[in-house]
Image: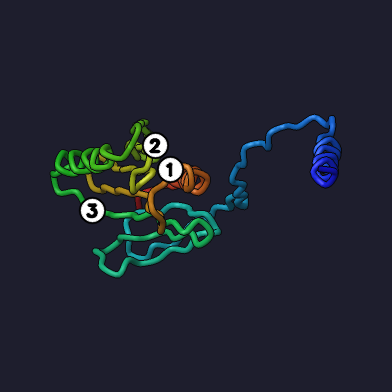
Amino acid sequence: MRSKFFIFSICLICISLACSKTDLQPKPKAQLALNYEKANYKAVDLKNCPYQFEINGLARLQKPKISQNCWNNIFYPKQKGTIFITYNKLQNNLNEYLIDAQKLPLQHSIKADHIEASEYNNPTKNTYGVFYEVIGDAASQAQFYLTDSTEHFITGSIYFEATPNYDSILPAAEYLKKDIRHIMESMTWK
């Protein structure tokens, strides 16, 4: 009987000592902290292409494995993402390219929560287009097209080397979206 009382007393003492009067607070939610360097833009020489623009110095310009003339990829090693740029020369078929470019973001509407389009017009540089921001677990987080309405038509889209999980790729997607906007703003026709 004494041994039971002794064990009970020790347990009671341990419990009372374990409980302190400190304020317990829940741990804060963890946030993914990805800090990318500030973009430093430079003009790229796209030999024999009728357009030029500026890209982020942290990105690498690559020729696609299978491509037509003046198609380019802009690869971001740190973000493991690529902006795919396609070029087509217009031959009285602007409406055909506009319809195709406007259908492309809609292909992601199955997985996307929201697709937001914003027009881009720069009469000084003779560039007109639309930037599509895709929100959700879609394969591409942003797409755009630019044209001068008579000779040139360019489309571009972002893809990552990862399963499309919006929360996980959001910091990298936001970084590349800023670069797409800069590409659109710096685009000039030769």
- Is residue 73 positioned above or below 91 on the image? below
Q: Which mark is residue 166?
A: 1
Residue 18: percent from left, percent from top:
82, 39
Residue 37 horizontal side relative to residue 169, left or right: right
Q: Is residue 69 above or below residue 129?
A: below
- Label 2 or label 3, whichever comes before in sequence order: 3
* Residue found at the far front of this picture: 1
Q: Nearer the viewer, residue 176 or 145?
A: 176
Asked whether residue 182 is in view, the answer is: no
Residue located at (50% from left, 56% from top): 79
- Distance in Å between CA atoms under marks 1 and 2: 7 Å
In which quarter of the view is residue 121 placed? top left
> Which residue in the structure is indicated by mark 2?
135
Task: Give the residue drawn at x 32%, y 66%.
Answer: 64
Q: Nearer the viewer, mark 1 or mark 2?
A: 1
**Callout 1–callout 2 Cβ contact below 8 Å:** yes
Question: Depth-wise, is mark 3 or mark 1 nearer the camera?
Answer: 1
Q: Label 3 belongs to which residue?
A: 88
Badge 2 marks a residue whose secondary structure is strand
Image coordinates for residue 147, horizontal then vertical, percent: 29, 43
Disc 2 crowd, CA 10 A, few/some/many (<14, 14-19, 20+): some
Q: Is residue 85 visible?
A: yes
What residue sits 55% from the left and 58% below the top? 57
Q: Is residue 160 left or right of residue 28?
A: left
